[in-house]
């Protein structure tokens, strides 16, 4: 029997050295299990941003940032984006395996039959101003779903968790499209069961009563790929938020609303919007040189958006796929000479050849291209993060479900390094 590997932590304040177990995953760095550190040494670890802390065990998604690898349940994202549609990827993330034909047909049918939302939810939208940001509408509306579907909120019942998962995956496109239609002042478009998941969403977004909507399969496939590339991404900020909210026993709809709220932050879900705004500010290929000079000047305040990543220190594998999709969409729509796309290509070429960016491993990330693709599809900038939330919902659900079923799961309770005042006495107000 192999001996348990350990790591020894030594102290210089008289505390004896302590051994801690070393745990190995299937791939990736080993982990030192320090759960007993406080009890044995009376000390915590300090790790702002959790850069070196594993908060959970997970078998869903794996990232090797140095090698530029992203795996869903062991499958490379490149293969999934090429050979699967979004609902197949949903099935994979939820169950751990890709479906066969019979399993996929059953899964698609179940999702399709849950795409309608309760009719009273229409009234909920009218509580928002017409100029409300769609993400504000999404946070409120998704959080309110528990008031409509309170028949499946027993977290200890796997069947209840399954039905909540189906409802969320199915209804998110409907709610997202309704948020868009509401801000546009257009009537809601209801789901059409004969269409695929992504085609249905595009129709709900862009169809109007005055004319027939025609599905463009090239554009549908592009949107489906966007969904696949954003479906999950390990323990990022919004996923960690969903897990933290879920650790208290909150219902799944509340947990998803918490994830959407976290995703709304510009450093997370708003990055593609920032990249598109950057290209608009540059304006023309001839001005890239001046822009790059300002980026290198730390005092200029100018940042290169859509490049670099918290995890990836190599070319983001999703960016390569999104770049291909970008070409496909622009060719289909006759936008090969699109100003922003040509500008993006020129900026990418310069950045990939410039030692300043190469040495800092600032490669294009998925956000660099996804904004251009969504813009070409007709999706307004204000909806970009909503699309992200729609796609990421399945990842949040898979992570939430995994956490609920984990016997080691405890309510999240990070520690702190306290730097405030020490104990002091209250002085009566007349003596202060």
Image (tube, rainbow, N blue to C red):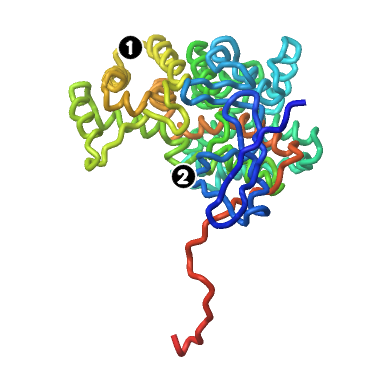
The 10 Å Cα crowd at callout 2, few under 14, some 14 to 19, many 20 or more, is few
Q: Which mark is residue 336?
A: 1
Residue found 55% across the figure and 39% down from its top? 238
Name the one closer to the observer, 300 or 208: 300
Vertical comparison of 192 with 423: above or below: above
Residue found 70% across the figure and 37% down from its top? 403
Image spot of residue 336 (x, y percent): 33, 11
Vertical comparison of 174 with 224: above or below: below
Residue found 56% across the figure and 12% down from its top? 79
Query: Residue lying furthest bottom in this view?
Result: 430
The secondary structure type at the circle numbered 2 is loop
The 10 Å Cα crowd at callout 1, few under 14, some 14 to 19, many 20 or more, is some
Q: Which mark is residue 132?
A: 2
Image spot of residue 119 (x, y percent): 67, 38
Residue found 22% across the figure and 25% down from its top? 288
Judge left or right: residue 222 versus residue 168: left
Circles 1, 2 touching at the beta carbon (< 8 Å) = no
Asked whether residue 214 appears in the rendered view, the answer is no
């Amino acid at each position: 029997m192999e001996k348990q590997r350990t790591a020894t932590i030594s102290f210089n304040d008289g505390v004896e050295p302590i051994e801690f177990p070393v745990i190995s995953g299937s791939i990736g760095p080993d982990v030192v299990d320090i759960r007993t550190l406080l009890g044995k040494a009376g000390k915590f670890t300090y790790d702002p941003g959790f850069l070196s802390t594993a908060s959970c065990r997970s078998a869903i998604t794996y990232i090797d940032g140095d090698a530029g690898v992203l795996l869903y349940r062991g499958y490379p994202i490149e293969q999934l984006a090429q050979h699967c549609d979004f609902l197949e990827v949903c099935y994979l993330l939820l169950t751990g395996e890709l479906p066969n034909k019979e399993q996929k047909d059953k899964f698609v049918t179940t999702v399709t039959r849950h795409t309608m939302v309760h009719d009273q939810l229409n009234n909920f939208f009218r509580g928002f101003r017409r100029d409300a940001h769609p993400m504000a509408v999404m946070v409120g509306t998704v959080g309110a779903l528990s008031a409509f579907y309170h028949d499946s909120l027993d977290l200890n019942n796997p069947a209840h968790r399954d039905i909540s998962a189906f409802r969320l995956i199915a209804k998110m496109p409907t709610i997202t499209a309704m948020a868009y239609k509401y801000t546009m002042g257009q009537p809601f478009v209801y789901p059409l069961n004969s269409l695929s998941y992504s085609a249905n969403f595009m129709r709900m977004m862009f169809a109007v009563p005055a004319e027939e909507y025609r599905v463009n399969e090239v554009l549908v496939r592009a949107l489906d790929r966007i969904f696949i590339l954003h479906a999950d991404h390990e323990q990022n900020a919004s996923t960690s938020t969903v897990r933290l909210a879920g650790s208290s026993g909150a219902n799944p709809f509340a947990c998803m609303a918490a994830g959407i709220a976290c995703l709304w932050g510009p450093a997370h879900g708003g990055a593609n919007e920032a990249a598109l705004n950057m290209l608009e500010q540059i304006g023309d290929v001839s001005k890239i040189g001046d822009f790059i000079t300002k980026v290198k000047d730390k005092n200029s305040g100018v940042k290169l958006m859509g490049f670099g990543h918290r995890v990836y220190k190599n070319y983001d594998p999703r960016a390569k796929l999104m770049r291909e999709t970008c070409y496909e969409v622009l060719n289909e729509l006759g936008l090969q000479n699109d100003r922003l796309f040509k500008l993006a290509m020129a900026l990418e070429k310069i950045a990939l050849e410039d030692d300043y960016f190469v040495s800092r491993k600032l490669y294009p990330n998925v956000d660099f291209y996804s904004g251009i693709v969504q813009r070409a599809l007709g999706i307004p900038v204000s909806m970009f993060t909503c699309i992200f939330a729609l796609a990421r919902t399945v990842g949040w659900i898979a992570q939430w479900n995994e956490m609920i079923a984990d016997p080691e799961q405890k309510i999240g309770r990070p520690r702190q390094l306290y730097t405030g005042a020490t104990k002091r006495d209250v002085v009566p107000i007349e003596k202060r």
